[in-house]
């Protein structure tokens, strides 16, 4: 009999299959650890007695999830791997994770121990990574438009790898860091990404030959090409197009006299589409670039998004009178965190975080609400006095929630607390409780 089901399901390698089984098992453990951390923090808060802010929103971060994402990357994109300088003497390479989407110190420490590199965009990000004891060659300064004094800072600290995409940047680097190892960032088709980046960065393909000639005249050291298909990319074929474009630029560089050694395939990987991207990106890289070319990536959101859960307190409630009169009760809920705080991902990252009931009255419901409870309609708001501070204009939740209840939101690890403000005096500190649902991660953290 023909194995119909097998023919239509994606072909998993034995490594992929083993990984996904172990991942599923660990996720069950992770859920119970997260539930326990949420509940034990809340049980220690007495809203009637605590000091001001004692009931502030807080995160639970599962560092085991970061570890699982790292292993998942290695299974799916084995060529785009941490590199410890065995194959080449000039620039040892790593898998540089983008720092900007989550600067949590424990996350960065775990990544450093996992051996990833770091993509930094500013002096402060570079310093944060150097302070962890990470060697300068594991950092790429991947901002094509850099502040001159930051370039000097990079030179002083021997951060050699940096990107450029315009002639002015080449003159700047010539002046402040003529020995830098330069990576030419090209623009991409990012029309299907959540956050478009090529509107702002990346050399158009009709300008790359001139840029390479200028770099050569200035006697600068160009070592490779980079791109970013846009953050929250939904189109794996954009990676293939960008790889082909990078190949053209490698060939142009050869004509100018450069022997490029490195391809940087940027960020844009999702937690839900890594396998799809890998299935197209991996073969494209192999087809257009011989094994001697080192390939790195700068994943950001992929590593951290699913590792963070946030819990928020219901501080106020208002009944919507018209709905009540129409016989369909609905409420406005006010939480102690909002778009000026950790829900900044709504504004900057075009996210739609989904509220779930964590605690109602004395009962906890993490991951376990009965599906047939009756649903009530809510709009969910942040604590600041601005009308834009709305987390959800309409959602349905079981139970009639009250002041003092708690909600939680999954997948809050990327572009959330890093872009939070202190507007209106809220959000002074971001409490994070850590759990570690992987023994491998625990061992690294203790080493
Ligand atoms: C933001 C950014 C990243 C990370 O992007 P993700 O979409 O979060 O993976 C990587 N590289 C550069 C240059 C960036 O600006």
Image (cartoon, rainbow, N blue to C red):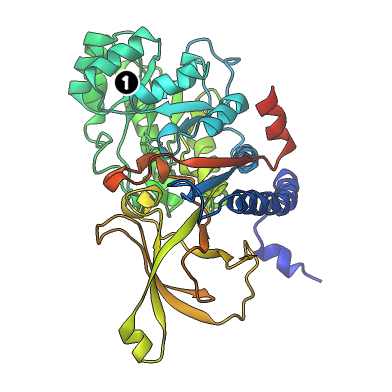
Q: In which quarter of the image is the C terminus?
A: top right
Q: Kindly identify the residue that appears in the image at 57 percent across and 22 percent down.
A: 83
The location of residue 89, given as percent across then percent down, is 52, 10
* Some atom of ligand 1 lies within 8 Å of the CB belonging to the residue at label 1: no
Quarter assignment of residue 423: top left
Quarter assignment of residue 227: top left
How many numbered marks appear? 1
Task: Name the residue at the right extreme.
Answer: 1
Q: What element carries label 1?
A: helix
Is residue 260 among what the camera can see? no
Q: Residues within 10 Å of mark 1 (few under 14, many from 20)?
A: few
The location of residue 385, given as percent across then percent down, is 26, 57
Residue 66 lies, with reference to residue 237, above or below; the image says above
Q: Where's ligand 1: which quadrant? A: top left
Is residue 83 among what the camera can see? yes
The location of residue 164, given as percent across then percent down, is 29, 25
Q: In this view, does 383 lie to the left or right of 18?
A: left
Residue 104 lies, with reference to residue 424, above or below; the image says above
Q: In this view, does 170 lie to the left or right of 93?
A: left
The location of residue 323, given as percent across then percent down, is 35, 85
Q: Kindly identify the residue that appears in the image at 57 percent across and 30 percent down.
A: 111
Q: Is residue 215 left or right of residue 69?
A: left
Residue carrying label 1: 255
Q: Which of the pair 202/334 is nearer the observer?
A: 334
Task: Name the residue at the front extreme.
Answer: 49
Q: Is residue 211 left or right of residue 392?
A: left
Q: In which quarter of the image is the N terminus?
A: bottom right
Residue 371 lies, with reference to residue 297, above or below; the image says below
Q: Which of the pair 415/285 is nearer the observer?
A: 415
């Amino acid at each position: 009999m023909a194995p119909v089901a097998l023919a239509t399901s994606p072909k998993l390698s034995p490594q992929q299959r083993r990984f996904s089984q172990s991942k599923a098992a660990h996720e069950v453990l992770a859920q119970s650890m997260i539930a326990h951390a949420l509940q034990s923090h809340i049980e220690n808060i007495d809203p009637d007695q605590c000091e001001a802010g004692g009931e502030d929103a807080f995160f639970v971060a599962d560092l085991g999830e970061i570890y699982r994402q790292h292993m998942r990357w290695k299974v799916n994109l084995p060529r785009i791997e941490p590199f410890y300088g065995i194959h080449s003497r000039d620039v040892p390479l790593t898998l540089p994770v983008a720092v900007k989407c989550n600067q949590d110190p424990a996350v960065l420490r775990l990544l450093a121990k996992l051996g990833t590199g770091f993509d930094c965009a500013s002096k402060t990000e570079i310093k944060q990574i150097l302070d962890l004891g990470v060697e300068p060659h594991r950092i790429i300064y991947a901002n094509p438009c850099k502040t001159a004094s930051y370039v000097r800072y990079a030179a002083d600290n021997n951060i050699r790898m940096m990107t450029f995409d315009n002639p002015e940047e080449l003159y700047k680097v010539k002046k402040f860091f003529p020995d830098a190892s330069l990576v030419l960032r090209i623009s991409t088709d990012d029309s299907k990404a959540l956050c478009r980046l090529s509107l702002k960065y990346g050399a158009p393909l009709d300008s790359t030959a001139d840029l390479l000639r200028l770099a050569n005249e200035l006697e600068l050291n160009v070592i490779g090409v980079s791109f970013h298909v846009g953050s929250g990319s939904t189109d794996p074929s954009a990676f293939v197009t960008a790889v082909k474009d990078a190949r053209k630029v490698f060939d142009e560089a050869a004509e100018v006299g450069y022997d490029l050694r490195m391809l940087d395939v940027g960020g844009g990987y999702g937690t839900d589409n890594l396998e799809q991207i890998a299935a197209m990106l991996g073969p494209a890289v192999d087809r257009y670039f011989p094994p001697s070319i080192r390939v790195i990536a700068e994943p950001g959101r992929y590593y951290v998004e699913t590792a963070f859960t946030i819990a928020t307190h219901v501080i106020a409630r208002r009944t919507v009178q018209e709905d009540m009169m129409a016989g369909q009760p609905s409420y406005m809920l006010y939480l102690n965190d909002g778009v000026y705080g950790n829900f900044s991902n709504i504004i900057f990252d075009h996210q739609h975080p989904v509220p779930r009931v964590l605690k109602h009255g004395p009962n906890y419901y993490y991951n376990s609400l009965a599906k047939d409870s009756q649903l009530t309609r809510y709009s969910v708001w942040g604590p600041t006095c601005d009308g834009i501070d709305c987390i959800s204009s309409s959602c349905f939740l079981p139970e009639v929630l009250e002041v003092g209840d708690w909600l939680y939101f999954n997948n809050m690890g990327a572009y959330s607390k890093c872009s939070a403000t202190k507007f209106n005096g809220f959000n002074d500190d971001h409490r994070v409780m850590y759990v570690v649902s992987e023994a491998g991660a625990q061992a690294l953290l203790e080493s």
